[in-house]
Amino acid sequence: MKSLLLLNGSPRGERSNSMKMLSRVGEGWVRGGGKAPEILHLASRPGFDRAVDAFSQADVVLLGMPLYTDSMPALVKAYIEALAPRVAAAQSGSANPTLAFVVQSGFPEALHSRPLERYLEKLARRLGSPYAGTIVRGMGESLQSMPDKANKKLWACLQTLGEQLAREGRFGETELKAVAGTERFSGFTAALLSVAVKLPIVQFYWNSQLKKNGAWERRFDAPYGPAFRP
Amino acid sequence: MRITILNGDPNPASDFQNYLQTLSQRLAAFGHTITQLDLAGLDLKGCSGCFGCWLKTPGVCAKRDDSEKVCRAAISADMLLLASPLTMGFTSALLKRAADQMIQIIHPYFVIEGGEAHHRARYASYPKFGLLLGVGGGSDAEDIEITTAMWKRMARNMKSSMVFTAVANRAPEEVADEIALVA
């Protein structure tokens, strides 16, 4: 039975959208015949340190993260920097595990995450690791607010990807595409959305929390310079 | 022009530090006002995705750390130069820590720009972006290309664009002259 090190790279830790997605992939992994994964959260110091030590012992490492300002969170970059000795180790014949990734972003389209996906694919090559693929998913923040039932299709697809990882050592292209959803808006959709974003209902997720926090009146505050006026 | 340099080199005794020093002296000699923030010496607590800067204390990180200094220096500049050596094929975790906390200078509301979903501006103007990469052992042209692609998208999400990218393998005076042309 193959071993899986499941690493949650979200700075939010256990209660993150990344972890929700990773859990489903982990379930699929077990269903596909893999050993129950060791789960670590990089946001906790002991989790981070253990993740550095355990890296080379796993057959497969699955690292999930949210997209932060268009790349990996600083926490994940710090982890990757801690793996630097594994580059030299691989060059002198010590094998590194197969690498698989999850990138989830708050944007609706997958295109925002593609440059990071390229980086992760290159990282696998740098470490001499077989590359199993990267699961890219937009609208990550809605995982937090939507009931689990609404995400049923997504969960099933993530489980299938986990099974594929256990059985074939890589993610299936069809499932990756299905999870990614919209790659880029069509001209028509973009035009429609340009109008829709002006409706308060579209910003409801933000507005309801601003009001709840008593920050509604201050929502356009600009402490460092002249504020934007549309 | 006012140029803010975010120095993301964690190593205080590196060649890259000397390189930056020569570069910023040259720019200052041209009459530019240089603010260099050495991120290694700042108190940056890092972004933990709490959205406090969007939803609780709009415009300011709820952790009240030196990310305020970074953001103030960015917003008041004409150009923001991100400077870092490449390690494991990307800029330092230190530079990324500062960048992650920069979401306080934009607004959570979604807008559509260039056919893509982005966030609304919080400020009337934003600095142009520049990127200066130190290349040590183990980095290749592909790393530079991928790194630049990620920061170009960041610049776009920060209501700006990347107007300058350079690798610190040429004379710093030469690179400073190029920055002076676009700043």
Image: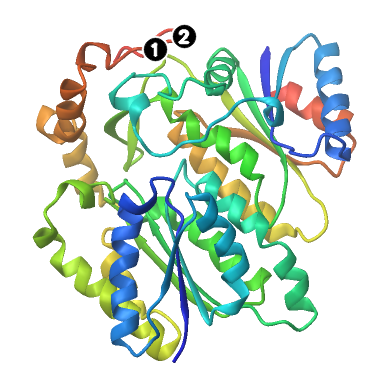
Labelled disc at residue A222: 1
Q: Can residue B107 be seen in this view?
A: no
Q: Which of B117 and A102 lies nearest the eye of the viewer?
A: A102
The reply to whether callout 1 and callout 2 are in contact (CB within 8 Å) is yes
| Residue at point 64%, 39% (across, down) | B94
| Residue at point 31%, 12% (across, down) | A229
Q: Which amino acid does label 2 sit on?
A: Gly
Alpha-carbon span between mark 1 and mark 2 = 6 Å
**Percent position of residue A204, x then y:** 14, 32
**Percent position of residue B26, x then y:** 86, 19
| Residue at point 83%, 38% (across, down) | B16
SS of the residue under disc 1? loop
Q: In this view, does A178 lie to the left or right of A80?
A: left
**Percent position of residue A222, x then y:** 39, 12
Q: Is residue B125 left or right of residue B27?
A: left
Residue at the outermost front position: A46
Q: Is residue A101 left or right of residue B78?
A: left
Q: Mark 1 lies on which chain?
A: A
Q: Mark 2 lies on which chain?
A: A
| Residue at point 39%, 50% (across, down) | A13
Question: How is the protein colored in the picture?
Answer: rainbow
Q: What residue type is labelled 1?
A: Ala
Judging by the rendered image, the residue that carries numbered circle 2 is A225
Q: Examine the image and state in which quarter residue A102 appears.
A: bottom left
